[in-house]
Image: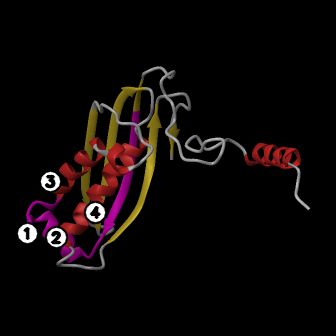
Amino acid sequence: MARQPAKRSAKAKQAKAEAGPALTHIGASGEARMVDVSDKPATERLAVAEGRVVMTKTTLDLIVFGNAKKGDVLGTARIAGIMAAKRTSELIPLCHPLALSKVIVDIEPDAKLPGCVVRASVKVTGPTGVEMEALTAVSVACLTIYDMIKAVERGVRIEGIHLVEKLGGKSGHYRA
């Protein structure tokens, strides 16, 4: 016996209400969609993300003393992270292309890990946030470090990529 559409609809509505806030990139029929931000005011928005590249002390020393065969590991990773932030909408299907006003990628060697801590700060004045741009910058900078040292150490780990802070927009300030 077939169910009646009205009963399924009522159950679906109840399940949706119990589930909490809806995912913004999912349409009413479950299809992926780009969020319409045309009615949102342009405000200043900032996002900061961070991640780590963990390696042996010997490999870290190669980076710090500039002895990596492929060249300046930290400088190359910094540029790669900046470029990645600018191209996020080409990599993440439902991201809006944004005219970024500022991208800073800082990479600090950390003897305690041992490894490198990668942090990206991204800023824009616009109708949508820059969390994905900051996370993409960190991810690509970490991958670039890995690429430049993989011949020396295959066991390098990329860890802990996360949003540290977000400012601006309707949802306000977030800090991890």
- Are circles 1 and 2 on residues that touch, CB within 8 Å? yes
Residue at the (29%, 44%) spot, across then down: 87
Comes first in the chain, label 1 or label 4: 1
- Are circles 1 and 3 on residues that touch, CB within 8 Å? no
In the image, taking residue 85 as reference, residue 71 lies left or right, namely: left
Q: Position of residue 50 (x, y in %)?
A: 37, 52
Task: Residue type at mark 3: give it.
Answer: Gly
Q: CA distance from mark 2 to mark 3?
A: 15 Å
Residue at the (61%, 42%) spot, across then down: 27
Residue at the (33%, 53%) spot, across then down: 138
- Are circles 4 and 2 on residues that touch, CB within 8 Å? no
Secondary structure at badge 2 equals: helix
* Within-10-Å neighbours for mark 4: few <14, some 14–19, many 20+: some
**Quadrant containing the N terminus in the rendered view:** bottom right
Residue lying at the far front of the rendered structure: 1
For disc 3, the marked residue is 75
Comes first in the chain, label 3 or label 4: 3
Secondary structure at badge 3 equals: helix
Q: Which residues are magenta?
A: 46-73
In the image, taking residue 112 as reference, residue 24 lies left or right, namely: right
Q: CA distance from mark 1 to mark 3?
A: 13 Å
For disc 4, the marked residue is 143
Task: Residue type at mark 4: give it.
Answer: Leu
Q: Position of residue 75 (x, y in %)?
A: 14, 53
Q: Position of residue 107 (x, y in %)?
A: 25, 53
Secondary structure at badge 1 equals: loop
For disc 1, the marked residue is 67
Is 44 located above or below residue 153 in the figure? above
Closer to the camera in the image, 160 or 42: 42
Task: Residue type at mark 2: give it.
Answer: Asp
* Within-10-Å neighbours for mark 2: few <14, some 14–19, many 20+: some
